[in-house]
Amino acid sequence: MSLSVCADCLSRLRVLNRPKTTYTVPIAATTFPRVSSFHSSSAAAKNNVLVKSKKGVKVIPPKHRGSQSAKMKKKVRERPKPPAIGERRAQRHRIVLSNTNALEVPGMEDWSKENMVDVQNAGHVLGLDGALLDKLRDCKAFKTTQNWSLFRRPATLIRSETIKIGQEMQDINRSQDTKTVRQLITGERASGKSILGLQAMCMAFMNDWLVLNVPEAQEFINNTSSYAPLKQEGTQPQSEQLYIQPHLTQALLTRALHSNEAVLKTLKFNHEFPKHLPLKQGTATLKDLVQLGANDHTFAWPVWQAFWREISEPGAKPRPPVLIVVDGVDHWMGPSKYRSAEYEIVHAHQLTLVRQFLGLFFSKPGESRPFANGGALLFSTTGSNSPAYPTFSLLINQLRARAQNLDASAPEFPLPAPYSKPDAHVLELMSGTGDVELIDLKSLSVAESKGYMEYFVRSGLLRAKITESSLAELRGLSGGGVVGELAKLGRRARL
Amino acid sequence: MVRSGSVANAHSSSLQRSLETFFGIGPYSRQRIMARFHLHDTMKVGDLTQTQVLDLTAHLDAMKLENHLRRQIQQDIQRLRDTGTYRGRRHAMNLPVRGQNTRSQIKTARKLNRVERH
C-alpha cells in the first residue's frame, strides 16, 4: 500500500509528548510549513550539508555568495573555416556570363560584322559569340555591376547610339584618310555608358582593330599602384615633374596582349626599338614587344613607349585602326592621391599614361594625328562614383553648349564662376575640345525599351506580357526608360 | 633595415602598418616617408626592391626612433625636474603637468607623469 504522504514528511512530524489519552489530531503535520504538496524530499535536500556524505567523498559547503546557476560544460564552438586567401577577392571580381536556369531565347541573332550597323537591329537584343567573348574578357570589358549573369548567354541591346558609333567606325575602315573619332560619353547612373564602351570594343574586334581598354580610370590616381618620377630627358627643364606607373602600364599591356594577340602577331616593326630591350631585331613582332612589357613591369614603360610609337607614327608597314576606351574618365580631372617626394599633391595630369591619353583626346588643332591609320577614342564618365570636379563639369557643359550651336562669345556660354579657382590643368584641355563629340546618353526610346523588356520576358525573367500600358508603367518607374533601371525592374521577382 | 628582423617577419604585411609599428612613427611621418620614396599606399613589405629597402633603412636610421626617442623623452623630463621647474615637480609628484584640475580624474597623470616614465 502506498502512503499518501511521503516518508520524509513523516519523519519531520513531531510527536508530542502528551498523554495518549488526550486526543491529538494526527494531521498536526499540516501546521508545519509544507514545501510541496506532492513531494518534499528534494526541497529538504537542497542544502548539501543535510545530505549524508558518502564515505571518502568530501562534502563541499555551499557557496552562498557564489553563483547558484548550474554549471554547464563549455561547448567548443565550431568556427567555420575562413575562405582561402584571395578567394573573397576572386568572388568579388568574378565575371559570370551565363545562367543555366534562364531560358534560351529562340531565334536571337548573333551580332557580327555583317549586321554590325544594320539600322533594323536598333532596339533588338543580339547575342555575342564565343571568340568575341574571350577577347572582351581578356580586355576586362565586362563588369560585375552589369547583369550578364542573369541570362543564358551574353547578349546586348543595340541602341541608336551603338549604330552611330558603328557607322563612324565603318567610315574609318573605308576611308583612305586617317581619321580619328573622339567621343565623350556622359549620362546618368545606369544609363549604359560602360556598355556602350563594350559595344564599341565588340565592333572594333569584329573589324580586327587594335583595342586598348582602361576599365577603371580610378586605378590610375588612387595611390594603389607603384609610381616613380620620370627622369627628365634633355636639358630643357620641364614645367612639372611627371610620374610613370610601371604596374599599371604592365596591366594595360597585358590586356592589350591577350585581347589582340592575333592582330599583334601579324605586325612587324616600322621603327627601331630601344637597344636595351631583349628582342631580336628583324624577326620580332609587336606581339613579342608587348609580351615583354606584360611579363616584366620594369620593361613596361619603355615597351609602352616603343609600342606607342609603332601604332601612332606612320611607317612602311600598315597599321590597323586603334580603339582606346577609358571608363570613369572624370577621375582624371583633378588632383590624384599620389604625393611627390616633397609631399605635394600630384595632379592626375602629371601621370604619364593619363597625360598621354588625355593629350590624344583633347588634341589641339594643328597637332599631328594620333594614330597611323586612324582610330577612335571613347572616353566615358562615371555616374555613380563621380568625384566633384567643377572644372570638368564646366568642360562638359561647354561641349553641350557647343553641340547646341551656341557660340563661345554668347552670354549663355558656360564660363568658370567668378572668384572660383578652376583647375589649370583641366582648363588647358578646353582649348582642344574642337574635335570632341559629346554623346549624352539619355533614356531608351520606346521601341528600344520594348525590345529590351521582351528579351527579359523571353529569357523567363519577367513573367508578364509587355503591352503598351505595362511598358509605359515600366518606363515611368525607371526614370523614363533609363536602361539600368529598366533592367532592375525586369529582374525583380513578382510574387 | 634598422629592424630588418621585424620587417622580414612581416613580409606580407602592409608597409604602412609595418612603419607605424615603430615608436616614433605615426600616420603623419609615415605618409611623408612613403611619399619621399614614392611608395604607394597598398604596398606590401615584400614588394620593396633592394634599393628601396636600403633608402628606407638609411632614412629610418637617421630618425630618432624607439629607444633613442624614449630615452630623449625621459631625459627631457629629468631635465625639467633637475632644474626645479613646476613641470618637473609635477612630474615627480605624479600629478597633472598642464594645469588640469586635480579634484578627480587624474588617473592617467598618476600612471604616466613620472620621471622614470618608460
Image (spheres, rainbow, N blue to C red):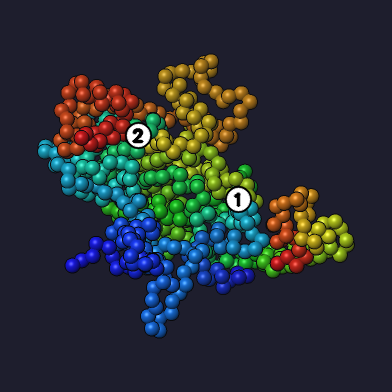
Chain letter belonging to callout 1: A
Q: Amino acid at mark 1?
A: Ser
Residue occupying image coordinates x 44% and y 63%: A68
Question: Residue B20: x, y in percent?
Answer: 59, 60
Q: Disc 1 or disc 2, which is closer to the eye?
A: 2
The numbered disc on residue A340 is: 1
Of the 4 image quadrants, the one containing the C terminus of chain B is bottom right
Q: Is residue A330 left or right of residue A20?
A: right
Residue occupying image coordinates x 39% and y 68%: A17
Q: How many marks?
A: 2
Q: Earlier in the sequence, mark 1 or mark 2?
A: 2
Question: Residue A272: x, y in percent?
Answer: 43, 55
The numbered disc on residue A7 is: none
Query: Are the residues tagged 1 and 2 within 8 Å (C-beta)?
Result: no
Of the 4 image quadrants, the one containing the N terminus of chain B is bottom right
Q: Amino acid at mark 2?
A: Ala
**Distance Cα–Cα, label 1 vs label 2:** 36 Å
In the image, A176 versus A355, the foreground residue is A355
Chain letter belonging to callout 2: A
Q: Which residue is mark 2?
A: A190
